[in-house]
Image (cartoon, rainbow, N blue to C red):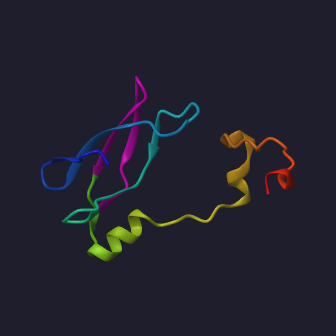
Amino acid sequence: MPKAHNIGTERFIQVIKQPLTWGNKLVVHGWTQEIEEPYRFAAPIMVRLPLSRILVLGKWQGTKSEEEALNSAISRRDLTYDDFEEEKGWRPPPNKDTEAYL
């Protein structure tokens, strides 16, 4: 996880590698959670930069207990039918005879 550089006591900045394709978007809202004390969380703005980098600008919204913070950091998300649209970048696997691999 990239280090969050504090700007004062409430705001922070990060530069991270771009993990996925955003299409034509230049700015999106994100989410971040510290997994070390003081376990702060935020919903920052993420700005696309050249060379597959992202500038993250945010304001800490509060703190959580250690257990809550770690659970939030590894939480799962239920997939919906909309997550499997080709417009969102999903590609079906090639058709193969699965019985041949058993």
Q: Is residue 29 above or below residue 36?
A: above
Is 10 displayed left or right of 50 in the figure? Answer: left
Is 38 displayed left or right of 85 in the figure? Answer: left
Nearer-the-camera pick, 61 or 93: 93
Is 36 displayed left or right of 100 in the figure? Answer: left
Nearer-the-camera pick, 91 or 102: 102
Which quadrant does the C terminus fall into?
bottom right
Examine the image and state in which quarter residue 54 appears: top left
- Name which residue lies at 86% across and 55% down: 99
Nearer-the-camera pick, 85 or 42: 85
Q: How many labels were placed on the picture? A: 0
- Name which residue lies at 61% across and 65% down: 78
Examine the image and state in which quarter residue 10 appears: bottom left
Q: Is residue 95 magenta?
A: no
Residue 90 locus on image (x, y percent): 69, 43
Nearer-the-camera pick, 31 or 51: 51
Q: Is residue 49 magenta?
A: yes
Residue 101 locus on image (x, y percent): 79, 52
Q: Is residue 43 above or below residue 53?
A: below
What secondary structure prevails in the magenta region?
strand
Q: Residue furthest top?
A: 50
- Name which residue lies at 47% across and 67% down: 75
Residue 13 locus on image (x, y percent): 25, 43
- Name which residue lies at 85% across and 51% down: 100
Q: Residue furthest left?
A: 8
Q: Which residue range is magenta in the image?
A: 41-58
